Image (cartoon, grey):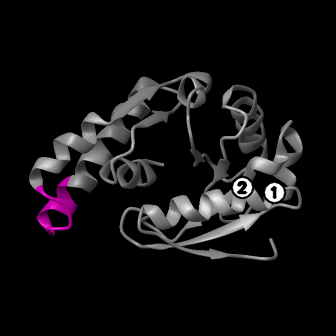
């Protein structure tokens, strides 16, 4: 998730990262800073934009705190249903009604994940080619109940941040 956070923050968005411990959050911030420094060294971004991007990032251990006023949620937890499903249930409960709930999953299917939500139409996969803050390609993979509107919103957002989305028709 730190690579997504790097990309979102360097593109000007306020980002709240969430993890289960303060230690993991500190490590994520360290990785984000390292990503930004490398991008500055390679002249992709300016040195001055490092501090600006880092200033856009906050951290919390609470899912509700991280998604409560989010316009977009990108989940990047371990590739196991028993971990993703409870997270999606909680994100669905606390995120604004129309906010897309997006997974970075590469091997799980959204149709299965979205079963645990009250609003499955807003759930979709946006699987990046890694690392997301460098490689522009991203697969958008809807589940059976994902709405066309959610696909449209996620695609437009990905294009706005410089990604090249490919919408898959089959999970």
Provide the residue span drawn in magenta: 37-46
Which residue is more in the foreground, 169 or 98? 98
Q: Is residue 40 magenta?
A: yes
Taking the image as drawn, is residue 137 in sight? yes
Disc 2 secondary structure class: helix
Disc 1 secondary structure class: loop
**Circle 2 residue:** 150
**Circle 1 residue:** 146
Q: Residue at x 44, y 73 (%)?
A: 136
Query: Which numbered disc covers residue 47?
Result: none
* Depicted 140 relative to depicted 115: above or below: below
Marks 1 and 2 in Cβ contact (< 8 Å): yes
* Depicted 149 relative to depicted 88: above or below: below
Which residue is more in the foreground, 90 or 45? 45
Quadrant for residue 63, please give it.
top right
Give x and y (percent) for residue 158.
52, 63
117 to the left or right of 42: right
């Amino acid at each position: 998730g730190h690579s997504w956070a790097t990309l979102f923050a360097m593109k000007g968005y306020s980002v709240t990262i969430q993890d289960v411990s303060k230690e993991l959050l500190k490590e994520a911030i360290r990785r984000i800073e390292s990503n930004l420094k490398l991008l500055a060294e390679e002249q992709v971004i300016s040195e001055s934009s490092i501090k600006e991007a880092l200033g856009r990032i906050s951290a919390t251990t609470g899912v509700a705190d991280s998604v409560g006023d989010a316009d977009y949620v990108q989940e990047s937890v371990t590739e196991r249903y028993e971990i993703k499903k409870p997270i999606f249930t909680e994100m669905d409960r606390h995120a604004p009604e129309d906010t897309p709930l997006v997974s970075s999953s590469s091997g799980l299917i959204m149709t299965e994940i979205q079963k645990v939500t009250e609003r499955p139409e807003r759930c979709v996969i946006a699987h990046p080619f890694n690392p997301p803050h460098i490689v522009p390609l991203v697969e958008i993979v809807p589940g059976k109940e994902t709405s066309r509107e959610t696909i449209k919103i996620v695609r437009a957002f990905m294009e706005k941040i410089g990604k090249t989305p490919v919408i898959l028709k089959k999970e």
